[in-house]
Image (cartoon, grey):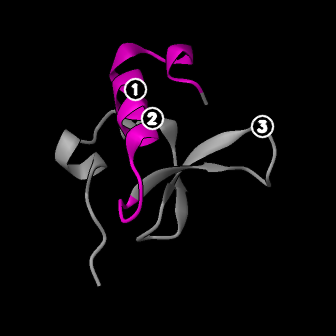
Amino acid sequence: MRPEDYPEEIARCLRVVWLNKDPCRYQPESIDGGLGWHVWDFKLHRAVPVDELKTFTFEQITEKLVS
């Protein structure tokens, strides 16, 4: 999943996700340790569909997980 492979509104979100580190809710994650990647939602424990990313605000994408 490379930002340049998607329309600009999705690419912007992906660029932010790629900069996220712990404890951010959304982070890039390898699919089965291979070359494929997806955006993982650590709060809901699921892969985020790419089309759903374009609906997120910057604040949502950079949300921190707190315990």
Judged from the image, the secondary structure of the residue bearing numbered disc 1 is helix
Counting labels gives 3
Give the spatial CA distance, label 1 vs label 2: 7 Å
Going from N to C along the chain, the mark reached first, 1 or 2, is 1
> Where residue 39 sits in the image (x, y, percent)?
52, 47
Q: What element carries label 2?
A: helix
**On the rendered image, what quadrant is the N terminus found in?**
top right
Give the crowd class for mark 3: few <14, some 14-19, many >=20 residues within 10 Å.
few
Q: Where is residue 41 in the image (x, y as percent from the top left)?
A: 46, 60
Mark 2 or mark 3: whose residue is earlier in sequence: 3
Q: Give the range drawn in magenta.
A: 2-25
Residue 58, horizontal then vertical, whole percent: 21, 40
The question of residue 47 being in magenta is answered with no
Name the residue carrying label 1. 10
Residue 41 in view here? yes
Residue corresponding to mark 3: 35
Residue 10 place in picture, x, y as percent:
40, 26
Q: Residue under circle 2?
A: 51
**Is 63 or 8 nearer to us in this picture?**
63
Which secondary structure, mark 3?
Answer: loop
Q: Say which quadrant the C terminus sits in.
A: bottom left
Q: Are marks 1 and 2 in contact (CB under 8 Å)?
A: yes
For the point 33% across and 21% down, the residue is 9
Residue 23 falls within the magenta-colored stretch: yes
Q: Is residue 60 left or right of residue 5?
A: left
The amino acid marked with disc number 1 is Ile
Which of the two discs, 1 and 2, sits closer to the camera? 1
